[in-house]
Image: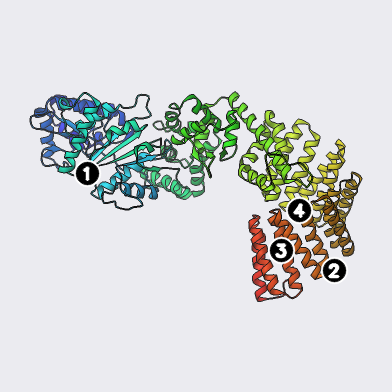
Amino acid sequence: MKAALLEALSAGAGGDAGRCAVAELARKLGLDGEASARDIADAANDSAWRDAVREWGEALAELLAADPDGAAGAVARAMGSGTTASWYDGDHADFRGGVFLREVVGVQVVIQRGGAAVPEALAGLPPRPGGFTGREGETAALLRALDPAGTSVESPAVLVAAVSGLGGIGKTALAVETAHLACERGWFPGGVLFIDLHGYDREPVTAGSVLQALLRALGIPPEHIPTTADERVALYRSTLAARARERGAVLVLADNASSPEQVRPLLPGDARHHVLVTSRDRLPQLGARLVPLDQLTPKEAYELLDRALRIADPGDTRVVDDPDAAEQLAVLCGHLPLALQIAVALLAEDPGQPVTELVAELGESRDRLGHLDDGERSVRAAFELSYRRLSPEQARLLRLLALAPGPEVSDEVVAALVGAEAPPVRELKALARAHLVERGSGRGWWRLHDLVRVFGVDVGSREEGEAARERVLGFYLWCASLADERLRWLPGMPVRERFGDRAQALAWFDGERAGLVAAVGWAREERFADKAAKLALCLGQYLDWRRYFDDLIAVTEAARQAAHLAGDGLAEAMAWDNMGVALMRENRADEAIEAHYRARDRFQAVGDGRREALAWNNLGLALMLGGRAEEAIVAYSRARDLNRTANDRRREASALTNMGPALETVGRTGEAITVHTRARDLFRAVGDRHREGLLWNNLGNSLRSDGRVDEAIEAYRRSADMCREFEDSYSEGNALYNLALAHNAAHRPDEARTACLQSADAYSRANAPAEAAQARTRAAELEVNPPLTP
């Protein structure tokens, strides 16, 4: 708002009624009657008083319209005598800063000779948003859509551009910033109409009232505005067409639209004009250029925090002084502009509060959305506007999606959440159009913004949520058990219908991994402990195979705790054994040894000799990792004997496979070759080609140690080929690396270098960057300084 208007009224340009209007505005803004026009204008420009100023503007417009030649003319003349007014053709005063009406934010008062004063909004853009940052790509897309000279085949100018996104994502800020940029380029000499459609209020602005406001804004006297909507549309478009001829293109910025029906009556007939729409819903029905908004990047969120805080106090350096805390704050705000602005307001209210303190408050709060409220703005309130427009089915789906484990959820898991055979596609698409759900990394995958997830959990009931989680655990356990079974499949075993081959089982595990690991974490809740612990056991083989060792440790620890609390000795023993394997993969030998001893003791206690043999075998591996080869040989021997007694030839072969390197370590190379040969024959007998492939690598090592290099080279090749068949890239990398060593020992540097590089590629596929780097380094060393040493 310009102080010139208030100064004119205070000076008596509007009579006693004008002076009273200024006093009334001061009262509404919490100021005393002695406040200056400048103080009142500054306070009125604060968005916190928007509703109060809007109501005041309506009353003032009525006052001026009632006496166009008297009060309105006097105000215009008084403003014209000052230095702050700007003029259009000398016939109306520019209240460019804005008196606020309900439908139209910026207002001009137009003095028409012989007619009434009418509100006009052709210079009514709100001020540029404070702290605006980022959005370069989206801003460029909107400018291309609005550019009157746009002739690009790839991105031509369009009549309508629609910005859509979650509540609080920054749609209005982007639209206003873009509109300012477009006006600075001179694209809309006819002016700008800014309209808040209140599309998500309980009573959205109707098309009729919007058109009435726009027609008044375009200079049409109230008595000349038609009563029917169709007639108003026709007059609106005719008036815009005339304005295009006389003054040029107009930009219509329609903020907060909830449906295409709200926007269609506002579309001009003249293609020189443009309409920029913001909505929480995608509006493809308008034939618009669609510009969806996502959350800010971490860098953009950091810049917003710093910039907005410095607007409040240029000397406030709390963000730059503690960038790590600022980054954590941005994460807790979900990189959502509204939440970030609220966080800034909270910090600005308490200049002495460190960012770390606000981070702690948000992180420890049971009601994070409740904390993201600065008295005027609220993240929860923003989400509630969208939530209450949902159908009961859509609202239930949103609540249940908020409970889904993992950052993304598949169609199958959605179906399990709602208790249906198939996912509710119609409801999912409706939530996606409303930006309450976003499409995930692939087709058939969905994700929620972090704060929407918090909101969904808050509005759901415990009974509804626990039943849904029970269904998800049931689905996961059923599917994971089948996938795990397929990974362990050997010739002669039955093949279930769900997974036709190993690749399908791995693909399912890969897609659902994050959700599976998160679901196992539910084991800490008594209701879900049994199924979650069983699910953890189904994941061990896969997580070890793909080398997700952090996940493996997490799920085995959750399963162990659940089994211990439930008093299930067998399940606890299995969890300890899996824990030991995971710890070995992280080279934590002492902890792994302890875990396998615990597993062995518990298997003995429950009388499970088959699994006791497995624990002995794994204990041997952990002892070898700890440099205790003699003890490892004892452990392997015990595993061999137990498996032989049980006539389990495959596990007997596994014990012998592991025993070979231990025998070799203590100088018993001949015995190592013998046990490896025996293990090879056993694996062939049971048809286990994968473990036979692993065995060939160990046999190659023994043969190379015995000086039988050519036989070792053949063994390594067989190992690499067999491991490749099973997509065991890590073991393939081991075999190829050892092949390089054998070639180098045979004075074949070119073959050695090639094998090293192939090994590096295999390790990279296996998510083993350290081993890949080592292999590449050895390949480079081989070129410069042969021979290669282990």
Amino acid type of the residue tagged 2 in the rendering: Asp
On screen, residue 201 versus residue 684, left or right, reads left
Q: Secondary structure at mark 3?
A: helix
Pick whichever, 514 or 260, lies toward us.
Answer: 260
Mark number displayed over residue 736: 3
Which picture quadrant has residue 264? top left
The tag earlier along the polypeptide, 4 or 3, is: 4
Label 3, residues with CA under 10 Å away: few <14, some 14-19, many ≥20:
many
The tag earlier along the polypeptide, 1 or 3, is: 1
Note whether 627 is above or below 421 in the view shown: below
Q: Which residue is mark 2?
A: 706
Locate the C terminus by quadrant.
Answer: bottom right
Q: Which residue is mark 1?
A: 249
The tag earlier along the polypeptide, 2 or 1, is: 1
On screen, residue 699 versus residue 78, left or right, reads right
Pick whichever, 92 or 209, lies toward us.
Answer: 209
Which residue is depicted at the point 67% across and 37% down?
479
Pick whichever, 460 or 381, lies toward us.
Answer: 460
Mark number displayed over residue 690: 4
The tag earlier along the polypeptide, 1 or 4, is: 1
Amino acid type of the residue tagged 1 in the rendering: Ala
